[in-house]
Amino acid sequence: MAAGIGIVDCCPGAVPARGWVTERRSRKDVGARLSLAYGMGKRKKITISTLRARKRESQRISMLTCYDFATARLMEEAEVDSLLVGDTYGEVCLGYSTTLPVTIEHMVTLAEAVRRGAPTAYLVGDMPYLTFQVSAEEAIRHAGLFMAKGGCDCIKVEVDRRLVKTVEAMASATIPVMAHLGLKPQSIQSLGGYRTQGKQAGEALRIIEDAKMMVDAGAIALLLEAVPREVAQIITASTDVPVFGIACGPHCDGQVVVLHDMVGFGGGHPPRAVKQYLQLHDLLVEAFRAYTDDVAEGRFPTEANSAGLEPKELHELQSLLEKSRS
Ligand code: KIV
């Protein structure tokens, strides 16, 4: 059912769009996207088997957060392996100071859009605050929305050993679970700040044990956030499931970065854990300023940016106007 929904929803090109919005696609583009959706593009669909094989062959896996169709298309073109529809959306797109206000409705809509843009990427949906902590039943129902409507390949939950039964229930209900361990931003109020977890040996051991418990409970992947690199290395070496890291050093099987950090959307210095590839902030401010100046000075729009009437039609219009006035 999920695959059917994914394919139909991946191809919304039949809907005519406004001609002055660049985002609309030509028939040729739609054809190209249809080929991708049906696996005829240059890249084959990335599945959990692909990721497992990558781990076995020591080939690193790339993951970026993604929250919209247009960016997903770019990431698909760039052949990013995996996209995470992360609840960081609440912070980087909605401007909240934490991820807590994000809702499942928000997230499933975003997942649908990202899937339309990136039909072959391994798509991970991030379960928002209190959509899985209350009961296993709620966790399964909410994760099911991500799978069936959002076309996700896997569902990420921020967990520790207290939620092992929930992960087990989700896995039994055919939900592919990615267990997020270490720094869990949804627990920020209890943690009291965003800082590295597992810096003391006892605490590190607990995270290592939690990781094993999650894999034993059926998690098909792990994501470690802000744990010391040695801890990340021990966990990665101790399991067959792919382990993604953020702010964990170089030893994980895969790396995830928040898009806005990577492209310098926010301006300022990137955090230590991030390599910044662009200063999009400066480029965009420059472009917005140039546009504002052009509008103010009358340099845009010009006649070239619009349609005109044929002389005959203009003439007829003038006669009609004259008649209607008399
Ligand atoms: O929501 C998110 O983007 C995440 C990453 C920081 C891993 O969970």
Image: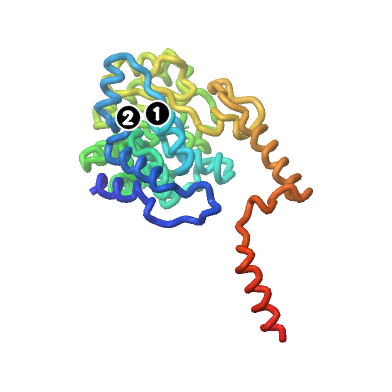
Q: What residue did someone put label 2 on?
A: 43
Q: Mark 2 packing: few (<14 Cα in 10 Å), some, or many (20+)?
A: some
Residue 297 in the figure: left or right of residue 110: right
Amino acid type of disc 1? Glu
- Image spot of residue 37 (x, y percent): 31, 41
Mark 2 secondary-structure assignment: loop
Residue 208 lies, with reference to residue 177, above or below; the image says above
Dot 1 corresponds to which residue?
79
Which residue of the protein is positioned furthest toward the bottom in this rendering?
Answer: 326
Residue 247, position in %: x, y?
49, 22
The quarter of the image holding the C terminus is: bottom right
Amino acid carrying mark 2 in the image:
Arg
Q: Position of residue 252 (x, y in %)?
A: 39, 18
Query: Is residue 318 shown to the viewer in this render?
Result: yes
Instruction: Using the image as rendered, state which of residue 306 and residue 281 is in the foreground.
Output: 306
Across and down, in percent, residue 225 comes to: 45, 26
- Which color scheme did the rendering employ for the protein? rainbow
